Image (tube, helix red, strand yellow):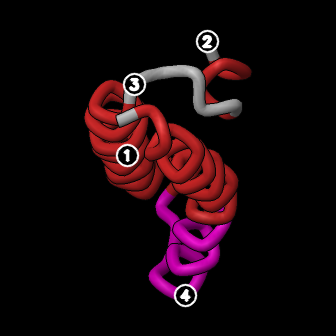
Amino acid sequence: MIKSTWNGNLALGRTFWVVYVLGSILITTFITLAVYLIVPIFGIPSSQLSILVFLFMLYFNPYYIYCWVSVWRSSGKT
């Protein structure tokens, strides 16, 4: 499914709503929960918290690029 989405073989609605919107919500929720669970357990100070959030978001950027390209390529299927 990942390769067919990347190639634009899925419908635009499914690509946008499922992959882009729902995936973004799930990843953002995961990052938020991870930060709120990691900080109290390890007692991370606020100066290091920004680095931690940056590292989580660094992993999120390739997914955003994947979503943008998939939606763009699926737009011809409408």
Magenta highlight: main SS: helix
Front: mark 4 or 1: 1
Q: Can residue 33 be spotted in the picture? A: no
Tell me what residue is drawn at x 37 percent, y 46 percent. Answer: 24
Cα gap from disc 1 to disc 2, whole angstroms: 17 Å
Identity of the residue drawn at 34% across and 40% down:
16
Q: Secondary structure at mark 2?
A: loop
Identify residue type, mark 1: Ser
Tag 4: amino acid: Ser
55 and 77: which is toward the camera:
77
Inter-mark Cα distance, 3 to 2? 12 Å
Badge 1 element: helix
Residue nearest the observer in this picture, 31 or 8: 8
Give left or right: position of 56 versus 46: right
Does residue 73 show up? yes
Instruction: Determine which of the numbered discs, if any, sits on residue 1 in the image.
Output: 2
Label 1 crowding class (10 Å Cα cut-off): few <14, some 14-19, many 20+? some
Tell whether 8 sits left or right of 23.
right
Name above or below for residue 53 compared with residue 39: below
Q: Earlier in the sequence, mark 1 or mark 3?
A: 3
Q: CA distance from mark 4 to mark 3?
A: 44 Å
Q: Earlier in the sequence, mark 3 or mark 2?
A: 2
**Which residues are drawn in magenta?**
43-56
Indicate which disc residue 47 carries: 4
Q: Is residue 69 above or below residue 70?
A: below
Determine the residue positioned at 39% across, 25% down: 11
Q: Which residue bears the numbered disc 3?
A: 11
